[in-house]
Image: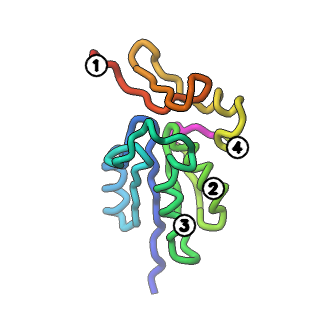
Amino acid sequence: MAMAKEHFVLVHGEGHGAWCWFKLRWLLESSGYRVTCIDLAGGGVDPTDPNSVRSFEHYDKPLLDLISTMPEGEKVILVGHGAGGLSLIHAMHQFIDRIRQAIFVAATMLPFGLQTDEDKKDGLPTLPKNEIELTFSTGVDDPPTTAALRPEF
């Protein structure tokens, strides 16, 4: 009996969605791997208004729901880029027994995710302030809830 190939779960970073993995997904699937690309809350084609996402629990819900509904004994390889690294960390803390490996591709790596004020400062991506507009739906002392390129860019 042939051993099943690994299941990759690809997690996008800030300003992206599942669509950003289309080339890697194609390469992995054409090699026989199982691949799931998800849209985190408010990302990609997810219909959630990003300004209504007030916590990482809410933001990561699609990823956490996917992992929680996996068959008993199945393990995944998580791959995340950018701020998606924080989502990987969140999932790793909740589902240590369901994650075979986590791969951080130019991703944020904090041991415990965004829990302390220092984590919030260190975990935010560096954004070109003159090129983007930030929205602070949870307050100006918290991380921005959305970042959008200014129309001229």
Please state which of the two labelled residues, at mark 1 or mark 2, is closer to the viewer.
1
Categorize mark 4 by other alpha carbons within 10 Å: few (<14), some (14-19), many (20+). few
Name the residue rendered at 31%, 47% in the picture: 45
Relative to residue 88, is residue 54 depicted above or below? above
Label 1 belongs to which residue? 151
Name of the residue lying farthest toward the bottom: 1
Distance between mark 4 and mark 1 Cα atoms = 36 Å
Q: Which residue position holds label 2?
A: 92
Q: Mark 3 is on which residue type?
A: Ser
Residue 147 x, y percent position in the rendering: 43, 28
In this picture, which residue range is highlighted in magenta?
105-109
Q: Say which of marks 2 and 3 sits in front.
A: 3
Q: Earlier in the sequence, mark 1 or mark 2?
A: 2
* Residue under label 3: 68
Task: Tell which circle, 3 or 4, labels the residue nearer the N-terminal end.
Answer: 3
Disc 3 versus disc 4: nearer the observer = 3
In terms of sequence position, does the residue under pointer 2 or pointer 3 come before the other?
A: 3
